[in-house]
Image (cartoon, coloured by chain):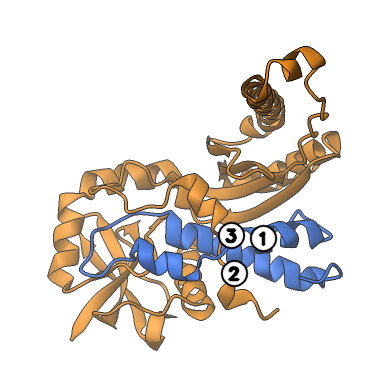
Amino acid sequence: MQAVYLYGIVGFPPEFPCRIQGLGGNPVRLLPQGDVAAVVSPSPLSPWPLDEAHVTLHETVVEDVMGNRPILPVRFNTLLGTAEAVIALLTQRAQVFRSALERVAGKVEMGLRILWQPAAEPEVSPDQEIQERGPGAEYLYWRLKEERGRSRVRAEGERLIHALQAPLLSLAVERCLHPFPTERLLLTAAFLVDRERVDAFRKRAAKVREDFPHLRFLLTGPWPPYHFVHGTEGFPAPSLPADRALASLPLRPWNRG
Amino acid sequence: MPADLDPGVAEHRITLLETLDRVLNRGVVIAGDVTLSVADVDLIFVGLRLLLSSVETARDLRTGRDF
């Protein structure tokens, strides 16, 4: 049975300038409805394997299209049973797709992750007075100390995040910040940046990196605007909570280095 | 992961991990006839260790991808 695999949503026209091969080697084409179109390829109505080759191919199609026009990337393994279902989707959500496309036109996403090593709290044993009050008092002492340590680390992290992102933000149109996704990660962020400003953004990030030598930086991009498609949701997102998603990045398919 | 991991390999892995995070977790969500389930994602999501060690091992952390 011939179903339709979705890679992204674009404005229409123009038609596709060139032929791109999608999942299963099937040709990628546009399914237009009014002034928006879905980037699709024919597919069986069953999920594609979640592995390096397939995920990379999905991303490659999105990036190829993005080289020529703005695109709203669609999540991996989104399949609709018929072309009519795709047309119905485009009709229903034309307005949100249109405004989301305007928002990302001429822009790319830059990703930033920052690792840190928060200073450990000194181990200070409770004084004799607390010890004499018994194990309950001592337990509360340690709990209180732990809590104070946590809020101190958090306050320090927040100060760093504020200082770090301010110079980057002035070169970006929008940002999406996830502070403290894990203990070692201070920040995961995505910035929506004008194409022409990508080099300037890279240079600014390098400068920020020099200013904070005790932090580790990972700058990636340019990416399709994955973090900047909000407003396009027509249904509750079956997404992983941000902290869990980060705490559970994939290992297996790439564990062969 | 060995501490002397080749920076090219580290960069390749980072790119894949970053791609995964986006392609599976971000982007437009459409309730299709077949959509990615959280259970599918769980099957291949194992831990953050790889990313952390990749990040710490890569010599040049300013990974830029040109196209």
Q: Between disc 3 and disc 1, whose residue precedes? A: 3
**Left or right, A128 with reference to A34:** right
Q: Secondary structure at mark 2?
A: loop
In front: B40, or A55? B40
> In this view of the protein, can residue A115 be seen by the observer?
yes
Task: Kindly identify which chain the residue marked by label 2 belongs to.
Answer: A
Residue A26, relative to residue B64: is it above or below? below
Give how far across and how far down residue A30 sits, in percent.
Answer: 29, 70
Q: Amino acid at mark 3?
A: Glu
In three-dimensional space, the C-alpha distance between marks 3 and 1, rounded to whole angstroms, equals 14 Å
Amino acid under disc 2:
Leu
* Residue assigned mark 3: B18
Residue at mark 1: chain: B
Residue at the disc numbered 2: A251
Check disc 1 and report the residue beneath it.
Answer: B49
Numbered badge on residue B59: none
Q: CA distance from mark 3 to mark 2?
A: 12 Å
Q: Depth check: give the residue in front, A237 or B43.
A: B43
Q: Is residue A201 left or right of residue B44?
A: right
User: Tag 1's secondary structure?
Assistant: helix
Query: Which element is circle 3 on?
Result: helix
Q: Colour of chain A?
A: orange
Q: Colour of chain B?
A: blue
